[in-house]
Structures are given as C-alpha cells and as structure tokens.
Image: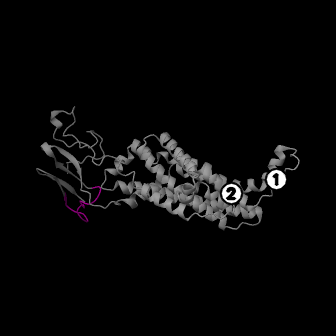
C-alpha cells in the first residue's frame, strides 16, 4: 500500500493509492495536523464520539494483562493461599501445639476440642485482618502509580472515557479478588474435610461471600483515595484509618445493623455457625461501592491537555514550519507525522 500526504492551508490530507479502505476518522489512532488560532499547527485528535463508557473493554483487557505480568499476581494470592493451606491444620492441632509449648497446664484448664467451625473462623479472621490490610496497602497505588509514570496520561489522550478507565480498574480488581477468595475458600473447605472428616459448606461460603462484598467496597474506596491522594503510602494510611473508623462505628447498634460497618464482624459470626442478619449491610455496601466507583473520574486528569506550541522556544528559524511533537520534543517523537511521501 502506498500512502502520500498532500498539504493545503488547513489540513494534511491522507491519500491512499492502494489499500483495503481509507482511514476512519473515528479511529482513536487517527490524527491530523491542523492550523489552530494564530496560524499555529499542532497534532489534533479526532473528536470524541463515544459514550461515557467508551473504551471499557480495552481498559479491562489492559488491566487484566497488567495483573498477570506484574507483582500483583504474586503478593495478594500468595498471602491468601498461605492462610488457606495452613488455617485448617493449625485449627486442628492447636491443642497439641499449646500443650507442647506451655508444658504443664494449670489445674482445671481444658482446651476445647477443635471442630471444623474453628477452621472456618480461622480463614475468615485471616481475611478480615491481614488479608484486608494487605489489600488496602496494595491498592493504595492502583491509579497514582500510573499517573506518576505517565501511563494514565498517555492512555487518556485517546478518545476514550476517564469514567471507563476508573470503572474498568475497579471491576477487574474486584473480579480478581473474587477469584482469589473463591480459590482460597475451596482450599480451606477441602483441607477441612480432610483434617476433620466433616465440612458442611453453608457456614463457610456464606461468610466468605459476605466478606467479599466488604473487600469490593474497600477496593472502590482505595481507587478513590489513590486519585485524591498522590502518595501510595498516604492513601494506604487513609484506607487503614477508614477501616478503623468503620470498626468503631459498628459499636453503635443502628450502624452495626444496617450499614457496611456491620460487615467488620458479621463474616466471623457466620463462620462460627451463628445466625446473623446481613441483608441490609450487604445491600448498603453494594450501593456505596456503586456510588464510589465513578467518583475518581473527574479529578483524575485535566479535561484538556495543554496544546503544543507553534515551535520550540530554542528552535531555529529554519525549522519553524515543521510540526512539533505534542510532548514538546522535536526529535525521536513517536507521535510525529512524516510529510515525506
């Protein structure tokens, strides 16, 4: 296929001599050089014609591949897998371990006989404490790391939605957490059946799914904090502070009954075999998560990036007519359009 460029007063017109079809102006990769105010030329992008969720599938695929090729595929899965494999064994042999370490036990002190409910409770408590703390720390930089490295700026200059960018991140990482929780719960269930010779699944799965709702809520919260607070450490500290406040709020009965604060203690109670009403806490948590998801989009980046100047301040007069890279560089720019055909 042969491509030539024809220069007129306003545009560079792309002429295809031979090829399957001309370029589509709605394509995110379609750029034209046009003359702006004052006779300046700059690299201009096609107008955005997508919806508020334009580019969601692309963002979701990009985020999934990023999880598979970065440290996130190892840290949180490794922590949860360790607790899933060791919890039932520790719950079964805790009396023997305590007896061996303590030596002579006080008179009248009897260790209760462990049951499968102890293994379930151990798994849920590990999720509610160390697992949730690790999640808050890991996702403190879920967006701020990309804004600092420039990846978010590069992606959002395309004709796609910032709302889709944020929602894709929250959705993919929530799905990732769901896969981890289901895998860890399956491992706990199987090991509990092997160690205790019985393992009814209702208490385990109900408590794990209720905790998963609480975990998804904190993923959306950390997404918002990652945008509002530039530092990953500060965002993680704010997330831990939010967890502490929610735990304290659960002491007040109305909040501990109907609000997401009830989910700080409800999963452990369900795992131990108690009957706990979790319908309202689950519904309010899902509603709050849905409200938090789009909030990081407006403050994510400026709505319009600064336009490229007509020429570099130090450029020679002879090169003033040549188009400049939108990043301000004149050489080795990946976005430069060659005028030679």
Name which of mark 2 and mark 1 comes first in the sequence.
Answer: 1
| Along the line of sight, the residue nearer the viewer: 26 or 294 | 294
The prevailing secondary structure element of the residues shown in magenta is loop
Residue drawn at (82%, 44%) of the image: 101
Badge 1 is on which residue? 111
Q: Residue lying farthest front?
A: 253
Residue 25, image quadrant: bottom left
- Count of numbered marks: 2
Residue 167, percent from left and from top:
41, 57
Residue 1: tell me if it is visible: yes
Badge 1: residue crowd in 10 Å (few <14, some 14–19, many ≥20): few
Secondary structure beneath label 2: helix
**Which one is in front, 184 or 279?**
279
Q: Name the side, left or right, on which 134 lies relative to 338.
A: right
* Residue 209 placement (x, y as % from top left): 58, 62
Region in magenta: 15-29
Residue 202 placed where, x, y %? 65, 67
The quarter in which the N terminus is drawn is bottom left
**What residue did someone put label 2 on?**
121
Residue lying at 43% horizontally and 44% vertically, measured from the top left: 144
Q: Is residue 16 magenta?
A: yes
Q: CA distance from mark 2 to mark 1?
A: 17 Å
Instruction: Please say whether residue 333 is one of the residues in the magenta stretch.
Output: no
User: How far across and down, in percent of the image, does residue 237 sit?
Assistant: 52, 41
**Left or right placement of residue 144 versus residue 27 in this view:** right
**Residue 307 shows which numbered tag?**
none
Judged from the image, the secondary structure of the residue bearing numbered disc 1 is: loop
Residue at 45 percent of width and 50 percent of height: 223
């Amino acid at each position: 296929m042969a491509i030539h460029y024809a220069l007129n007063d306003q545009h560079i017109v792309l002429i295809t001599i031979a090829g399957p079809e001309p370029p589509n102006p709605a394509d995110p990769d379609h750029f034209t050089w046009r003359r702006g105010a004052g006779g300046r030329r700059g690299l201009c992008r096609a107008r955005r014609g997508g919806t508020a969720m334009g580019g969601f599938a692309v963002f979701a695929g990009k985020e999934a591949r990023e999880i598979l090729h970065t440290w996130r595929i190892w840290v949180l899965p490794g922590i949860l897998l360790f607790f899933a494999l060791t919890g039932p064994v520790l719950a079964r042999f805790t009396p023997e371990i305590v007896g061996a370490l303590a030596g002579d036990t006080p008179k009248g002190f009897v260790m209760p006989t462990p049951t499968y409910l102890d293994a379930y409770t151990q798994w849920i408590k590990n999720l509610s404490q160390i697992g949730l703390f690790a999640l808050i720390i890991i996702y403190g930089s879920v967006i701020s790391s990309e804004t600092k490295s420039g990846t978010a700026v590069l992606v959002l200059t395309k004709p796609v939605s910032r709302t889709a960018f944020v929602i894709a991140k929250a959705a993919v990482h929530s799905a990732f957490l769901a896969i981890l929780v289901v895998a860890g719960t399956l491992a706990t269930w199987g090991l509990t059946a092997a160690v205790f010779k019985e393992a009814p699944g209702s208490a385990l799965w109900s408590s794990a799914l209720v905790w998963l709702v609480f975990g998804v809520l904190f993923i959306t919260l950390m997404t918002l904090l990652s945008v509002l607070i530039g530092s990953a450490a500060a965002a993680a500290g704010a997330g831990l502070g939010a967890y502490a406040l929610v735990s304290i709020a659960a002491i007040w009965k109305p909040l501990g009954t109907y609000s997401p604060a009830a989910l700080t203690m409800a999963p452990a109670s369900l795992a131990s075999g108690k009957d706990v009403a979790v319908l309202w806490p689950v519904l309010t948590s899902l509603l709050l998560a849905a409200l938090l998801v789009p909030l990081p989009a407006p403050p994510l980046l400026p709505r319009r990036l600064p336009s490229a100047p007509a020429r570099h301040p130090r450029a020679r007069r002879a090169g003033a007519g040549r188009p400049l890279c939108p990043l301000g560089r004149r050489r080795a720019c990946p976005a430069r359009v060659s005028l030679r055909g």
